[in-house]
Image (cartoon, rainbow, N blue to C red):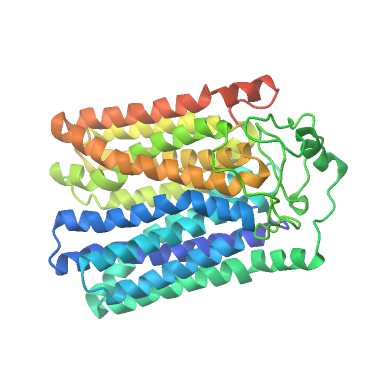
Amino acid sequence: MIAAGEGALPVLALAAANMLLYVGVYLCQAVVPLLTHSMGGGAAVIGWVGTAYFIGTVVMRIPAGMIADRWGRAAPLAAGAGLCAVAAVLLAIATSPLEQAVFRCLQGIGLATFTTAVAPAVAALAGSGRLTHTLSFFGISTNIAAAVAPATGIALLGRLGPVPGFGLAAAASIAAGVLALRGPAGRRAERAAGRGAPSPQPAHAAAPAAAQGPTAGPGTRRTSSRTAGPAAGPAAGLAADPATGPSPSPATGPATGLAARPSARPAPAAVPAPLWPPLAAAAAFGITYAVHADFVPVIAAGRAIPAFGLYFTVYAAAIIAVRAWGGRIGDRFGHVWMVVPGALFGAAAWLLLGRATSLPALLAAAVLYAIAGGTIHPACLAACIARAPASRRGTASAAFYLAYDGGDAAGGPLVGGLMQSASVPGALDIAALIGVVGALGMAFGRPAKRAAAAGSPAGG
């Protein structure tokens, strides 16, 4: 759990805002395919409407990160929630699959804008040495939304028609924006802005920045936690990582998470080099996630496994439990110690699923893959944010989500093609291998070796 302290309430408020935004998106995601089918759209058309949403998220990730780095996080949070609300209203009046595709793309742009900004905002509020745990706990909000929103949307559609569900989605999106900007995190940002200047940092907190110099950029080794002195707490706006040591928060005030002073020059578009190993692991995990998202029902139904819908219920419960506590491993030992074991659990899940013929085996695969999802996703996100310069954390968040979403998008056709051309067990074995290779790439990547040589926990 998030320890009580100065940053706990703002983090919980941002988690609630994130949950509300995803409730709105998942309500629409469950209902739109049914409405597309009722308009005469076949499977291919339904697929393209869903792809339009994905295109929106991919196109907006990097621009959203650069906007957050350049002008602060408040504007992307407001714009993202507003676009999701507008998209939900427009989906309620859509009369053709083409219109649905356009509005779902708009919703994808809104979600990418909001979530790209909210991750570094949460990171700025994390207490010293608690970055991974805070981000992991924060991610539970998405899992809760995924557990309740789709069934709610389908139930509303069946009883009251499409308008109430889309109305609820719009209201949830608006509430997300209001809570993010006017809730505890937003009020803290306003108080910091009202003071007109950054709060003074202790000398030991300023030491890493001085060591880097004003022009430190990608590839510059950050001062180790062993030479930076004691880590400051949330009031100093620091988020510690085992491999990089305390890194200054981009917030102007004490860990506001939202307010940020515009930088003197726009952040470069290139992704910092130390991010590539966790990005590769995130993309590989995205490929394996396509099995979970797209093929579990098909495989279970094809083998006549009864009540296979329980797979997703067990998965949701297990991943929430893992996320609540698993991030402590990354904060204490380094992110690699979450990613590599997580990939092994994920591989075991798909090796078992490829040969499962009973409900107990299917549910065991759900638990194993929940352990993978609850460790790899937050660890890779935290690694990207921790390895990026403080002024580039929005871009780092964007790069992570782009890699993960891209892997998921590529995984569907890849695994589906292998299932058709070879066999289900063979396809899932290859997916499992890809996940492990990506994790090992992060473990033995050059930034991990430099971190170990610098005397910090390996693989942070």
Horizontal and vertical percent position of residue 148:
38, 63
Residue for point 72% across, 56% down: 5
Q: Specify the quadrant of the image occupied by residue 107.
A: bottom left
Horizontal and vertical percent position of residue 253:
75, 58
Q: Quadrant of the C terminus?
A: top right
The number of callouts visible is: 0
Answer above or below: position of 345 versus 160. above
411 relative position to 303: left or right: right
Instruction: Tell me if I can see residue 230 in this picture.
Output: no
29 relative position to 275: left or right: left
Residue for point 55% across, 63% down: 77
Answer above or below: position of 450 versus 256. above
Front one among 336 and 216: 216
Horizontal and vertical percent position of residue 266:
62, 49
Answer above or below: position of 220 versus 13. above
Horizontal and vertical percent position of residue 305:
18, 45
Front one among 329 and 54: 54
254 relative position to 35: left or right: right
Instruction: Tell me if I can see residue 38 in this picture.
Output: yes
Q: Residue most toward the right?
A: 203
